[in-house]
Amino acid sequence: MGERKVFNKYIPPDFDPSIVPRKKRTRDNFQINVRMMLPMSIRCNTCSNYLYKGTKFNCRKEDVLGEDYLGLIIFRFYFKCTRCGQELAMKTDPKNSDYIMESGASRNFEPWRDSNMEQDIAKAKREADEEGNAMKVLENKTLDSKREMDILSALDEMRNLNNRHAKVTPDMVLDALRTGAEAEGDSLAITTEDEEMVKSLFVVPHLESPSPLYTDSHLESP
């Protein structure tokens, strides 16, 4: 029995590679088996099973005929649900550097995709407004310059604030806390003295003898 894991195989001297028949492969609907990870989280439409990003699959890959983006080939992948075995299909999206679910499952909600889409819409709207309008281009450039200057000034202010905080030592912090405590104690002492003075000014003197209207004889009489 010959070796299985050897790199050099025996080739007879009368071997002619041109005689070996070759299988003809057609490019139409040509599929190859590949192993890949799921690039997004999806939900199967048949069994409602969730398949999470990073799940590994054995897929069948083929070229999407009649579709491309700026000369880039769009690929389609076929794989199966891990629970019910339903065939799922997705294809590449070179325009957005992403993937699109075609059939069998739906993509889970991703909030950052909406923000990116809004940015793309705003950018396309700006380009459409600037097309053939020099004043609009100048106005947008002025707004961009102003926004950039505001950002730079805010960064400078934060940098200066960080520099001031970096110069503060623990002894300085303790001195500031001690000074604040002393000032608070002085204010409390002043407040106490003021209250005592007000009480002394508005004190009501006690009557030495009760009023004749409220003597015991009046209380005892019917």
Image (cartoon, rainbow, N blue to C red):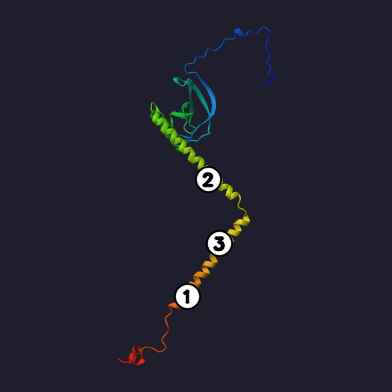
Residue nearer the viewer, 172 or 80: 172
Point out the image quarter for the N terminus.
top right
Instruction: Please tell me whether residue 219 is drawn above or below residue 201 in the rendered image.
Output: below
Residue 180 marker: 3
Instruction: Please tell me whether residue 158 is drawn above or below residue 46 in the rendered image.
Output: below
Q: Which residue in the protein does label 2 denote?
A: 157
Pointer 2: residues within 10 angstroms few (<14), some, or many (20+)?
A: few
Q: Which residue in the protein does label 1 denote?
A: 197
Point out the image quarter for the C terminus.
bottom left
Pointer 1: residues within 10 angstroms few (<14), some, or many (20+)?
A: few
Q: Name the element at disc 3.
A: helix
Residue nearer the viewer, 185 or 10: 185
Instruction: Calculate the distance from the C-alpha at mark 3 to the C-alpha at mark 2.
Output: 27 Å
Q: Where residue 130 appears, x then y in whole percent? A: 40, 29
Q: Pick whichever of labels 1 and 3 is earlier in the sequence.
A: 3
Instruction: Calculate the distance from the C-alpha at mark 1 to the C-alpha at mark 3.
Output: 26 Å
Instruction: Please tell me whether residue 35 is drawn above or below residue 13 in the rendered image.
Output: below
Q: Is residue 70 left or right of residue 175?
A: left
What type is the residue that disc 3 sits on? Gly
Q: Where residue 17 appears, x then y in whole percent? A: 62, 9
